[in-house]
Image (cartoon, helix red, strand yellow):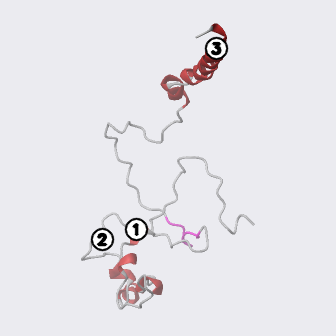
Amino acid sequence: MTFVRLIPLIAAAAVAVAVAIPFAASGPLAQEAKQPKALREAPLTEMSAPPDVTKQSVPASGFERAYRQQPPLIPHKIDGYQITTENNACMGCHDWPGNTRVNAPKISETHYVDRQGVRLDKVAGTRYFCQQCHVPQADAKPLVGNIFQNATQAK
């Protein structure tokens, strides 16, 4: 092979090295320095202390919804509630006729319709595990900055 034929190969190798050097400089050490601060106080390999349990604070008017089809928030603690395939503690107060006895909101009629649109006498299995959609809410200090505005505030 002559020197003239080697020139393109040498040039290609020089370009490959020139492109690879910046990526080598941004290896693991450079990436570690750029990592954002974690919200956890202890690494995942260590057990961290649970947060203090405080009484849930609920505004007198309840919590507003942030968008049109948002599931209602739960305005009370649910720490001790058990939901299994045999028992759902939420239904004691929120299913008919229990809701009239304790003056609690009745679950939506949509919860009694299955995937095929068939009306049921009991809560549909797809709507049985309440915490898939509904969550307890409290007035708590945000962990990170947030400029979210709900649909009525954004107008």
The amino acid pointed to by label 3 is Arg
Q: Quadrant of the N terminus?
A: top right
In the rendering, at what x and y percent does residue 109 appear?
46, 87
Query: Which residue is found at the position 57% from the left and 74% from the top?
Result: 69
Q: Secondary structure at mark 2?
A: loop
Q: Which residue is mark 1?
A: 131
Towards the viewer: 128 or 59: 128
Image quarter hosting the C terminus: bottom right
Q: Look at the image and give the residue range highlighted in magenta.
A: 58-65
Rendered position, 74 above or below 100? above
User: As displayed, is residue 21 above or below residue 74?
Assistant: above
Image point (53%, 51%), residue name: 141
Badge 2 or badge 1: first in the primary sequence: 2
Q: Which residue is mark 3?
A: 5
Three-letter amino acid code at the position of disc 1: Gln
Q: Residues within 10 Å of mark 3 (few under 14, many from 20)?
A: few
* Amino acid type at mark 2: Ile
On whether residue 66 falls in the magenta region, the answer is no
Tag 2 residue: 83
